Amino acid sequence: MTIAITGATGNIGGAVARALAADEVPFRMVVRDASRAPRLPGAEVAVATYADGDAARAALEGVDVLFLVSGAEARDRLDQHRTVVRAAASAGVQHVVYTSFQGAAPDATFTLGRDHWWTEQAVRDTSMAHTFLRDSFYLDFVEDLVGEDGVIRGPAGDGAMAAVARADVARVATAVLRAPERHMDRTYDLTGPAAITLEQAAATVSAVRGRPVTYHRETVEEAYASRQRWDPEPWQADAWVSTYTAIGEGALAKVSGDVERVTGQAPMSLRQVLAARSA
C-alpha cells in the first residue's frame, strides 16, 4: 500500500508524517515547495499544488491512500479541492482521507463549512472510498482569539463549542492511515472532551497564563465593523464572523467520542493544549 500525505509542512500533516516515519511506514509527501518538506526517513517528496491538476495527478501516480488536508482559506479553495480530487481519481487513488469540518453542510452557518461539504461530495462522486474527519474548531486557536487588550470579541452569545486539539486530529488521521481498510466510507466527528463557551475559554486562558482574559459578546454588526481594520475581502469577513455565529447557534456544541474510539485515547482539553504549547 502506498500512502500520500498533503500538508506535511503544516501542523496536522506534519504531525502525521512524523508519526508514520517513526513507525517506519513509507509514504510520499506532496508539497508545494520541496525545500520546505521535512526530512523524514522512508519519505518521498513530490511537488504539486491543489490547483494544478496535471502536477497533482503526476504526484499521485501509484498512490493507494491519500491523506488530503484541506487547503488554506481562499476564495477559490473549493475549486482547488475539486481539482485535486479529480486528479487523485484519475491517478488511480483508491481511498481519500479528508480533513473536513463538524457540521459540514451546503447551508452551514460557518461559511467555510460549505466548502467542506462540497469537497466531500466531490469525493463521493468518484469511485474512491473515503474517510471524512470532521474536525471541530481547533483548541489551539482559542488563545489566538485573544486581542492585545486581553479580550475575545465575537457574536457567539452563550453558545458552546466542542473544539478539538490539532494533535488529536493528527492522531486519528495516523490511526486511519495505519489501517485504512477499517475506516473505509466512514465519517468521524472529531471533538474535544467537552463543549465550552467563549467565556469559559477566556477564563481557562486567564488561569493558565496568569493574565486577565475576558469575553465580550459583540453583535453581528459590531463584529463586521471591528474586523474592518484588517480590510478583509467580503468572503473572509463572512468566514470570520460566522465562526462565532455558528458557535452561538449551537452548531458546534455536540461532543463526540470518535477521537477515543479510533485512537483508544481520550481527547485533550483546552487546559492541556495550553500547557503543551507552553512546553
Image (cartoon, rainbow, N blue to C red):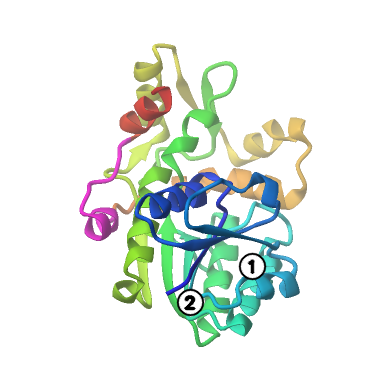
Question: Which comes sooner in the sequence, label 2 or label 1?
Answer: 2
Query: With 94 as the anchor, is 86 left or right in this view?
Result: right
Split into 4 quadrants, where in the image is the C terminus? Answer: top left
Q: Which residue is labeled 1 in the image?
A: 81
Whether residue 136 appears in this view of the structure is no
Q: Which element is circle 1 on?
A: helix
211 over 194 or under it: above or below: above
Instruction: Please check the rendered image and state whether residue 144 is part of the magenta-colored stretch, yes or no.
Output: no
Q: How many marks?
A: 2
207 over 59 or under it: above or below: above
Q: Nearer the viewer, residue 231 or 24?
A: 24
Query: With 86 as the anchor, is 273 left or right in this view?
Result: left
Residue kind at label 2, given as amino acid type: Asp
Q: Which mark is residue 64?
A: 2
The magenta-colored residue range is 256-269
Q: Quadrant of residue 181?
A: bottom left
Q: Residue furthest front?
A: 41
Q: Which element is circle 2 on?
A: loop
Residue kind at label 1, given as amino acid type: His
Q: Position of residue 112 (x, y in %)?
A: 59, 57
Whether residue 17 appears in this view of the structure is yes
Q: Residue furthest bottom?
A: 127
Q: Position of residue 240 (x, y in %)?
A: 62, 44
Residue drawn at 23 percent across, 46 percent down: 266
Q: Quadrant of residue 76?
A: bottom right
Query: With 77 as the anchor, is 16 left or right in this view?
Result: left
